[in-house]
Amino acid sequence: MSTNGWKVRPQIIRKALSQSHVAPNLDAAARAAFAWPAMRRELLGDGPEDWNIGRLAADRHAAGPRASRAALRWLPREGEARDITFRELRLASNRFANALAGLGLRKGDGLFVLAGRIPELYFGVLGGLKAGLTVTPLFSAFGPEPIRTRVELGRGRVLLTTESLFRRKIAPILPRLPSLRHVVVVAEGGSGGVLPGTRDFAQLMEAASDEFDGAPTASEDRSLLHFTSGTTGTPKGAIHVHGAALTHYATGKFALDLHDDDVFWCTADPGWVTGTSYGIIAPLLHGVTSIIDEADFDAERWYRILEEQAVSVWYTAPTAIRMLMKSGAELARQRRHPRLRFVASVGEPLNPEAVWWGQEVLGLPIHDNWWQTETGGIMIANTAAMDIKPGSMGLPLPGTEALIVRRDADGRVLPVETPDTEGELALRAGWPGMFRGYLDQDERYRKCFAGDLYLSGDLARRDGDGYFWFVGRADDVIKSAGHLIGPFEVESALMEHPAVAEAGVIGKPDPVVGEVVKAFVSLKAGIAADAALRTALLAHARKRLGAAVAPKEIEIVAGLPRTRSGKIMRRLLKARELGLPEGDLSTLEGGA
Ligand code: ATP
Ligand code: MG
């Protein structure tokens, strides 16, 4: 399988080889039988219609056989795990909903939650949804300015945060948050009393009833306001509605294959849409236990969690997988995870090397899936029963129609039927989880649609079997000597070298060919960046991709700039290379 250190892999992983003993939820019969009305009945039953995501998620399993099962298993940074049962989650979120109502907050008011992954974050988000507020979880590593702009844009009325975050990040900007009426603070024992100008979370909870009678919520009522990752520019605020619960439910069942007794771990922070749709809502709707790890990424800790918590379904991201790959197979082999049966990834293209790493190191391939903040839930996926073509995002889920489109000379958007043709990835509008607007940017929202097609801004192609392949974001695609080059293809080829940990590829303006391809590459631990390696990488890329597509330049760097949600920021690589303004850096990892 190896020539001069480069690996040559088969094109397909057949599922007959998989180890899973659990019958997948989505087999051919379920795919053929899928219909949204039946899904809706499964989720809502025959009772009065109430789409409230907070109630559906926190209350659906709070009585009956799962009431005393752990809904959340919280792993603090240090110390003992704490289980929060479905019953407790219902009561705690009821209390917070009552506390919000007691503060005079009403349906549609904005609740911002700025906290690390602690139980209060989950009570806050679910309680806020129950009370009908529009909820925005913010990533706790944001600096004061990105927090301020988001709270201001979202006209936040109430903020739930922690004592230390309040001191460091909120107190300095409080005078510049005119829309904010209340700040609720989770005490951490440092203040010796309630901070001036704030409410104490524990006191509010104690004073509130644990029964909450919210008015039924309509499917079109606003639920969450989520900011995008800012990979291509200034983050946009995507508005979601309660009816999205149906997308969360269906995708939890079919894309993540959640089964009754699963232990599920979504590693995303609720500050990003993956961390709410799948880190909070979908597993609760299905009554499975979710692992919540307070700590940041650490390879050894992560392998330990997989083993000790007996995680069965794991949803993570390419950046985390690449970091695990970087940390070496030895570390992985020190741990066992016999219950792990399904692994999925989202957020960035998943290089074939990463799919194979899963197969070889975890004994399971990694299932890539594709979606966006705007789509609210998974749209295209490699599901449990499918054969995997490493490098492909998989097939559209049932109930989702995905197309490849192009504009003709008159600007009309037309579907491309010919297989393997690149074009923009579009979705037929109307799925329940679709965003309903960009905050304060109506024109931008309208431009995302051509008739009833939602245009994703990503370029892809569909092969003869219907599998979708990511090419690149429309903004990142490189035009060179009449070719359209997707950075993903070039990056994946470079990743095949055992020395390469990560690659980011951009186009550099060139007077002759338009743009030339330049690659930035970071190496695995302990590997020296010498001229021989650079030459070997250039030669391999040329052999693998052809001279027209291969990079002309390779720069070896210590690390690549990425968003806090873990995406390579190619726009920043390009701006820095060309000496151009760096643009919005609010989501840059390690930034202010
Ligand atoms: P912004 O819109 O602010 O630039 P963003 O698009 O990165 O940020 P998200 O909504 O978090 O914000 O990310 C969605 C995007 O992530 C997709 O449009 C796509 O470009 C990329 N993406 C997500 N999953 C995949 C995947 N499986 N394969 C390839 N790309 C993916
Ligand atoms: Mg986007």
Image (tube, helix red, strand yellow):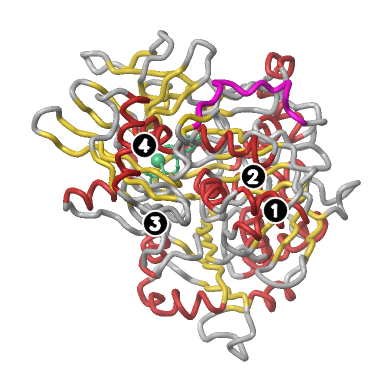
For disc 2, the marked residue is: 217
* Left or right: 47 as drawn, with respect to 355: right
| N-terminal label among 4 and 2 | 2
For disc 4, the marked residue is: 445
Q: Is residue 241 above or below residue 123?
A: above
Which type of secondary structure does the marked residue at label 4 adopt?
A: helix
Indicate the position of residue 481 as horizontal and vertical percent values. Answer: 18, 23
Label 3: how many Cα within 10 Å (few below 14, some 14–19, many 20+): many
Q: Is mark 3 within 8 Å of ligand 1?
A: yes
Q: Quadrant of the N terminus?
A: top right
| N-terminal label among 1 and 4 | 1
Residue 430 covered by magenta stretch: no
Q: Nearer the viewer, mark 3 or mark 4?
A: 3
Q: How far apart are marks 1 and 3 (CA)?
A: 35 Å
Q: Nearer the viewer, residue 341 or 337?
A: 337
Q: Is residue 547 above or below residue 201?
A: above
CB atoms of marks 1 and 2 within 8 Å: yes
